[in-house]
Image (cartoon, rainbow, N blue to C red):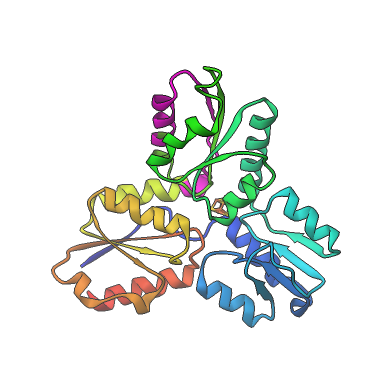
Amino acid sequence: MKITLAQSLGMCFGVRDAIDLALMEPEPESVTILGQLVHNPRILRRLEEAGLRIAESPEVPVDTGRVIITAHGVSKTIRGRLEERGYQVQDATCPLVNRAHRALASLVAAGYFPVVIGQADHVEVRGLVGDLAECVVLERPDDVARLRAHTDVGRNGHARLGVVAQTTQPLDLVRERVEQIRAALPEAEIRFVDTVCRPTKERQQAARELARQVQVMVVIGGRNSNNTRQLARTCAREGATVYHVEGAADLQQEWFAGVEHVGITAGTSTPDEVIQEVCAEIERLG
Ligand code: SF4
């Protein structure tokens, strides 16, 4: 059985830098990470073993003097609240998440009604929209219909919508959604800023190309990792049979019976050693 790794896969620089920052803390017991630093159970365990505490979310009060904002970022409101409470704040927000914040803020400042394509309950999206008086988050195609009710399109006959995306959304899905908005609100002026991050684009493209050549794609990453789930979705759209696993222990022999070519990809928070373990186990099972 042939096994091929996607040309681009696994941990991105934003996640690597956030982990390094946390693990470099000189007194880890006095530091709380505000939410899942990355969506990967193995890394979260490693951080806890190093002595760092992990809070459920940035909104929850904690009892250490120092806190770390995760790679997904927070709103200015939450950051201000942390400073008011007297915490020393270390910021591990990925620069590409900050870029999405700046893009949305510029659109709002220019008078556009803010629209975010992404998952409403994802911590990055909560951070993006947290300072806005009003905003629409588009998760599913049906959500586009809600836009008319929430904006002044229809009332004034014209509206300006400023659209950005969660950094880990597949660009093809985002572009589709923008076209749906244009079709649903032809009288509106739509300004779209592409805020999907480069590592996501590279992993999506590589996964798409590989999924066309293989029968089975194994996608490695946390079950709650948005970008890993999106990789699985992209591979399935290309016609491959897809298995989403968190690690080697999830693999099942029958998945590979009669299979000649298996492809492997991994989300941006999946450590290299997990990818290697999964590869070795697939080789053994195959
Ligand atoms: S997935 Fe993209 S935005 Fe998120 S941490 Fe990695 S590089 Fe940054």
Figure label count: 0
Q: Is residue 100 magenta?
A: no
Picture quarter with the N terminus: bottom left
Q: Which is more toward the observer, 237 or 84?
A: 84
- Quadrant location of residue 59? bottom right
Which residues, given as a range, are shown in magenta?
176-200
Res 228 seen here: yes
Residue depicted at x 70% and y 29%? 109
Q: Which is more toward the observer, 97 or 178?
A: 178
Residue depicted at x 49% and y 46%? 118
Q: Does 131 sit left or right of 190 as displayed?
A: right
Residue depicted at x 59% and y 77%? 46
Q: Does 122 sit left or right of 79 as displayed?
A: left
Q: Position of residue 198 (x, y in %)?
A: 52, 44
Q: Is residue 188 magenta?
A: yes
Res 6 seen here: no
Q: Position of residue 245 (x, y in %)?
A: 37, 69
